[in-house]
Image (spheres, grey):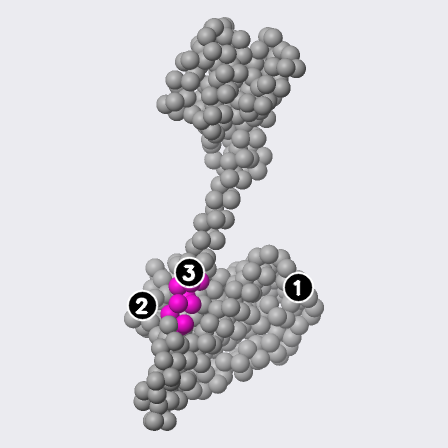
Amino acid sequence: MAEKVLSLLIVDDEEGMRLGVKRSLRHFSMEAEDTGDIVKFDVTEAASGEEAIALMKESSPDIVLLDNKMDGISGIEVLHWINQNDLDLMAIMITAYASIETAISATKQGAYDFLPKPFTPAELKVSVRQAAAHLVTLRQARELEREKKRVRFQFISVLAHELKAPLAAIEGYLFLLRDGIGMDDPAVYEKVVGRSLTRLGGMRKLIYDLLDLTRLESGQKKRELSSVDVLEIAGISMETMKPEADRRGITISIEATSEEISMVADSGELEIVLNNLISNAVKYNKDSGRVTVKVMDEPELVRFAVTDTGIGMSENEVEKLFGEFVRIKNSKTRDILGSGLGLSIMKRIALLYNGEVTVESTPDVGSTFTVTLQKT
């Protein structure tokens, strides 16, 4: 819970009114409904519309209590100036000459509320509280919209970057095939086609990961919860990665604390988690290495711990994991393809089961990723 201070400007040609407002709001505070932040008020004053405009030219307040009938320019004219300059504030009109016409005119110029004189300190606080709450909500909504635009831009930028490299590589290989350069040699031909297929597989994985992520975030993915055989799903995930592991001489083994382990879950979600765990353990392993999948059955939890004998990570690299499109890039990972979304998806799924994902890693020794899920 944080403390916020909103600036409030009282504009009135009656000194007693200005002092009364300052006194009433001196120790006044409120709690923001959405965030729980404590909001306090820093009150300044202006004795005329001209003085108010001069102050607002230097620094825009958050809330203005504005008398309408003043010597010189009126409160309605000050409102008009505020509206023309598009200031981000809440204006509350205060006047002893209340009328429907004045209220309509003030509202058209952007006034948030209308407080007729005389008013009590309690009425003043109610009006200020409502204006402050509305202002905080509006600003939060605008900030959220800006954040959405920033994330959308970042997402598109990263996606374009991730697709640009494999597309360029495939395009280069296709030019070689078109021009027949080195294609008389079957080994060269096979290499070119093989690399193109590998790049296409990486792009397909990126697309599938994006679909999984957007379905999870939007809530559009229908979850089908039932009692599932955890060891069976772990075995399927292991078999999926076995061809790549065999190609590199990597052994995969499963260790379980019970012969039968079940939990209430969506089998597709468990498969995504285990596929990512085992896939990464193979992908970032050393040739002729080992991958150990431990499945632990506990009273209220199922715990997966996947250990590899791979390249490992430093503490600084571990801290960067689990963000979207985050991939650890160094001399050891330069040629390893990936979408950078797998761990982010895995963490989101773990949260659906009130669980967590942790990692322990040592450079050049290996890593252990542990996913803990509640059974029900």
Residue 259 drawn above or below residue 56: below
Q: Residue at horizontal 47%, vertical 76%?
A: 201
Tell me which amino acid carries mark 3.
Val
Q: Quadrant of the C terminus?
A: bottom right
- Residue 160 on the magenta span: yes
Question: Residue shown at 54%/35% (left/top)?
Answer: 138
The answer to which of 69 and 139 lies nearer the viewer is 69
Q: Let me know if residue 224 appears in the view.
A: yes
Mark 1 highlights which residue? 223
Q: Which mark is residue 330?
A: 2
Q: Is residue 73 magenta?
A: no
Tell me if mark 1 has few (under 14), some (14-19) or many (20+) residues whose alpha carbon lies within 10 angstroms of its own: few
The kind of residue tagged 2 is Asn
Tell me the chief SS of the magenta region.
helix
Q: Magenta segment range?
A: 158-167
CB contact under 8 Å: marks 2 and 1: no
Q: CA distance from mark 2 to mark 1?
A: 37 Å
Q: Residues within 10 Å of mark 3 (few under 14, many from 20)?
A: some
Determine the CA span between mark 3 and mark 2: 18 Å
Please give the name of the residue rendered at 46% of the width and 76% of the height, measured from the top-left corner: 200
Q: Is disc 1 placed on a helix, strand or loop?
A: loop
Q: Nearer the viewer, residue 102 or 55?
A: 102
Identify the element where label 2 is drawn: loop
Residue 184 in picture, x, y percent from top left: 34, 94
Identity of the amino acid at label 1? Answer: Arg
